[in-house]
Amino acid sequence: MEANLPDARPLINVCDRHGFVPDLTLYLYKKSMLRYIEGYVQKVSPAKTPAVVGALLDAEADEAFITNLVLSVRSLVPVAELVEAVESRNRLKMLNPLLEQLVSEGSRDPGVHDALGKIIVDANTNPEHFLTTNPYYDSLVVGRFAERRDPGLACVAYKRGQCDEALVACTNKHAMFKLQARYVVERADAGLWESVLGPENASRRQLIDQVVSTALPECKNPEQVSVAVKAFMGADLQAPLIELLEKIVLNNSSFSNNHNLQNLLIITAIKADKARVKDYIHRLDNFDGPAVGEIAVGYELFEEAFEIYKKFGLRAQAIHVLLDHLEDLDRAHEYATKVDEAGVWTELADAYLAHARVSDAIAAYLRAGDTSKHVEVVAKAHESGDYAELTKYLLMVRKRVKDPKVDTEIVHSYARAGDLPALEAFVAAPHLADLRAVGDRCAEEGLHDAARLVFATIPDYGRLASTLVKLHRYQAAVDAARKANSPRTWKEVCYACVEEGEFKLAQLCGLNIIVAADDLAEVAEFYTQRGHADELIALLESGIGLERAHMGIFTELGALYARHRPERLMEHLKLFAPRCNVPALIRVCEELELWRELTFLYVAYDEYDNALGVMVGHAAAAWEHVQFKDVAVKVKAAETLYKGISFYLEEHPELLNDLLKVVESRVDHSRVVDIMRRAGQLPLVKEYLVSVQKNDLQAVNEAVNELLVGEGDAAGLRDSITSYENYDALALAGRLEQHEDTEFRRLAALIYKRNLKWHKAVALAKTDKLYEDAMETAAQSGERGIAEDLLRFFVEEGAHDRFAECLDRCRDLVKPDVALEVAWRNGLTDAVMPYLISVLRDYTTKVDTLVHERKEAQEASKLDEEAKKQQEQAANAYLHLNSYLALPAPTSNGAPSPPAFGDAAGFDRF
């Protein structure tokens, strides 16, 4: 831009608007238009003063002009941007007047104070004072500026503003580890400690050395020390921590007697350097012995833990270490003897007990006078069998503890030790022992003599009996069982006697058992499993005579007879069947196939169907005719009865009629007939059929008729068909019609006549020339055609006398004209005359009767007409009278009133 503008204001506006302030400044400066520069920064845009100053410095303008220009706008200029523009050109000092003026005016702008601090640091005019007293500058900004000139001043600035990261970086960079160590300790910030002690810090070792050697020994603040120690612990720097703590605690510092630091030193040594622990234990006195000892135990420093506990007089913990961790019982015994304290002896005794050294444990408990573990001592003594020592211990316990369990264990110990006299003396004196429990234990452990003594003392006869059994003293056991009188005891003694073959004693016991139904089966099973069936039968045979004998005894005895003495079963059943459990014996007999006895049981149990089934199925062993008949009458299922009939038909046909007579009311006669017919044995039951024909059943009637026809018994057949009507008449007639015997054919005609088959009856009679039967049938038929055909038949046959007889018998059916025609045509006038005379007489009688009846009817009709006329006259007179009585009253217009009742004039009008 070379033009010389007379007025630079347009250019100023354009450049200001479009950001060409440096170009504008350079143009105005070159054209010596300084007045426009002042006007621009003072009036147009004071905020762009940094850009104008920068351009002027680049143009190497007069510093005085620039200073005056800046002072002219003072507070309007953005100080931070101005400082940046000037500082970037290394001309910061020129702003000193402006900055001092702003500070004197009370400016608190950090930018102003930052710039002033940089000038002071750069000029080195007592910078420490400014850095430590000025509260307004930005420590990080000034510190970074100072770091390039003096790292110590930078650390002062960083420390003032607690710029931890910047200070650490600065001190690491310039190897100022002592200053860094002091700052970190004084700062007492856990986060800062974590960062500087982290493995990523390459200068950690140098810092630790300065902290241990300088910073912490100089520190007097417990909180700072505590934070530092925690930081080392958090960073898991065990060895440096030990060095640190030794420096603090062992070098006669103000923290030498600090309780926590002593604890920490020993604990850290326990964790990191076990070799130093014992030395620390002896040199330090103000640490927490119980807590540190517990930690030492946790890290398996048992000797050190023992020394700690011993130093602090913690004898119980000391003996625990010896027993539980070092597991040195001899050393523990030596220690217990040395301290001679009850609690220590107790701990030692517990350890002995845990290691099953029961005798030593009891001796230790006796030294301690401790009775609290007597239950465990008893248990261990039982395991080891030290009953002599246990007795001494329990007697000591008994003096202090009044506990029934103790006395009980004393009795048991005597028993186990075999000291029966002492046992007897003890139980004879007052005591609290549970003798029953002791006796049970002795019995379980096989100490039967001791158990006998205890049970006899109680007394418990049941358990005494059990014990005597085990001692094989069976007679005494039976006596004790009799006193106990309990089923369990009786069974135990009984079973033991059976096992030993003492069957008489067993029977004495068994009689007291089998009277209980629930126990009988068990006793029977016990005897049976051991093959003593005969002895069991003897026992039950004795038992059935007892007052309390029950059904089970009789039933079980029956079952035994069935299995072992079948020949005696029937006698037993006949005598005691009502007292037996019949279903149970039925099952036994079925299993053993005792059919005769099974039939008897079924009958006794009213199972007649099953009884009949057994007799039919096993006739050889079970059938008896009289019994079969008795059972058949009571059978409920018809099919069973028919099976019985079929059985008789096959096996005993000669007795079938006898059976059928008995069951006559129970069977379906038609089905019986069907059975016999299919078997082809119908004649076999004729007697039965005749006896039941009175029921008039078709099947029976037809069977009887069939038998009579087959036998040629025409008279019997006539009686049957005339007495009973329920049969197939036409079928029978058709069969008889073909019979060679005339009598049977007459019976066929009779059947046809009885069934109104008149034509067939007459035709059959004519065929056999039974003219009497033919005429009788025709007369009975009431059909004119049959009678007239019969007349013509007689004429054709030349039976003139039969013609006249037929006219006489059938005169009500034959028309006179037909009779005269037939007689006239065939020259039988004389034969027809009697018929004609009779007919004329009948007709004459009938005519006279009709005439007489007609005359009587006419007379009666005439009388009826006269009576009817009289009734009509009387009715009319009554109506006239009612009409007169119903006339209305006289009116007021002078009309005549009706005549009074009885007035003659009134009657004349009618």
Image: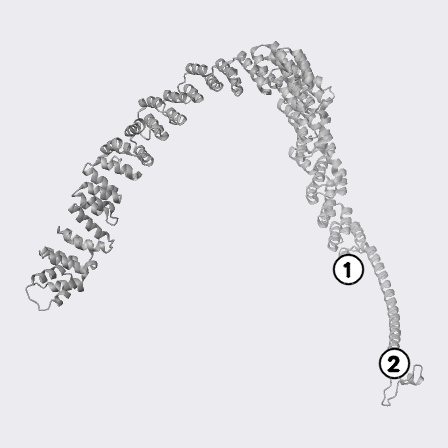
Mark 2 is on which residue type? Tyr
Residue labelled with disc 2? 884
First of labels 2, 1 by sequence position: 1
Q: Nearer the viewer, residue 250 or 267?
A: 250
Residue 503 visible in the snapshot: no
Label 1 crowd (10 A; few <14 / some 14-19 / many >=20) = few
User: Which picture quadrant has residue 861?
Assistant: bottom right
Mark 1 is on which residue type? Asp
- Judge whether 355 appears above or below 83 on screen: above
Label 2 crowd (10 A; few <14 / some 14-19 / many >=20) = some
Q: Nearer the viewer, residue 68 or 372?
A: 68
- Secondary structure at badge 1 equals helix
Q: Nearer the viewer, residue 351 or 422?
A: 351
- Pinpoint residue 787: horizontal percent, then vertical percent: 75, 53
Residue at position x 69%, y 37% from top?
668
Q: Which mark is residue 758?
A: none
Label 2 to label 1: alpha-carbon separation: 70 Å
Q: Nearer the viewer, residue 473 or 418?
A: 418
- Pinpoint residue 658: horizontal percent, then vertical percent: 73, 30
Residue labelled with disc 1? 817
Q: Closer to the camera: disc 2 or disc 1?
A: 2
User: Where, quadrant-wise, is the N terminus in this rendering?
Assistant: bottom left
Left or right, 811 with reference to 258: right
Left or right, 388 with reference to 512: left
Left or right, 625 with reference to 440: right
Question: What colour-coding does the image apply?
Answer: one colour
Left or right, 340 with reference to 798: left
- Judge whether 112 appears above or below 558 on screen: below
- Pinpoint residue 444: horizontal percent, then vertical percent: 57, 16
